Amino acid sequence: MRLTEFGQGPLYALAVDDSHNYHKESSSNSNPGRGWVVVRAPALTATSIVAAMEAGEFYASSGVRLKDVRRRKDRYEIEIEPEEGVTYTTQFIGTRKGFDRTSEPVLDKKGEPLAVTRHYSQDIGAVLAEVEGTTPSYRLQGDEIYVRARIVSSKPKANPYAKGEFERAWTQPLVTGRASATSERESGH
């Protein structure tokens, strides 16, 4: 709805660790190293890094490393940096034109609506395709409003925030009809 009804730009995927506890690792502590971003910038300067992030030229990770992400006009391609013995599943997530726009407020413990969020239909942010391997790609069907990817590895996360967490990465959206020149670059991360 942000893209279709309000004419706003996409929201980018971020991963941060919000660290407060540095000396003892525990799932109950807010430890460093649980999430970060990898930026594709032409130079290691604040100006270049900020410009690249504003253009969506980065991905978020909790351990999975990507060699490249290519957002083309009709295709989304990813190249994962493989680790021996680790498998990867990529979910291409998006919303199609004509999606169910219904939503309901999230209620607090008293049954009162929270102003900060809503439950949206399953059409919003649906898994459009799931691909195994280190070179997943998705060919647009033509009715997508946007497509992004979530990569899940079989490798357990070191120092997880919760038991059973696996390393992941999240890419930025390809917004159909609005792909910029920077989003069609061929260079790698």
Image (tube, helix red, strand yellow):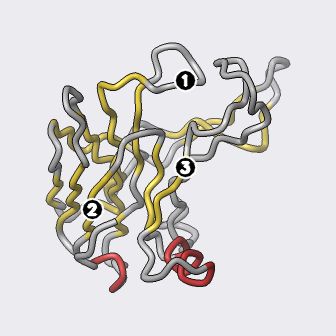
Q: Please, is residue 51 above or below residue 98 in the view?
A: below
| Residue name at image x 49 percent, y 25 percent | 158
> Where is residue 79, by image quadrant?
bottom left
Residue type pointed to by label 2: Asp
- Residue 37 or 93: which is nearer the viewer? 37
Residue type pointed to by label 3: Trp
Helix, strand, or loop for circle 1? loop
Mark 3, other Cα within 10 Å: few <14 / some 14–19 / many ≥20: some
Residue type pointed to by label 1: Pro
| Residue name at image x 77 percent, y 31 percent | 21
| Tag of residue 2 | none
Task: Find residue 109 and report its horizontal and vertical position in percent.
Answer: 81, 18
Mark 2, other Cα within 10 Å: few <14 / some 14–19 / many ≥20: some
What residue is disc 2 on?
68
Task: Find residue 140 and report its horizontal and vertical position in percent.
Answer: 18, 61
> Where is residue 119, by image quadrant?
top right
Quarter of the image that includes the C terminus: bottom left
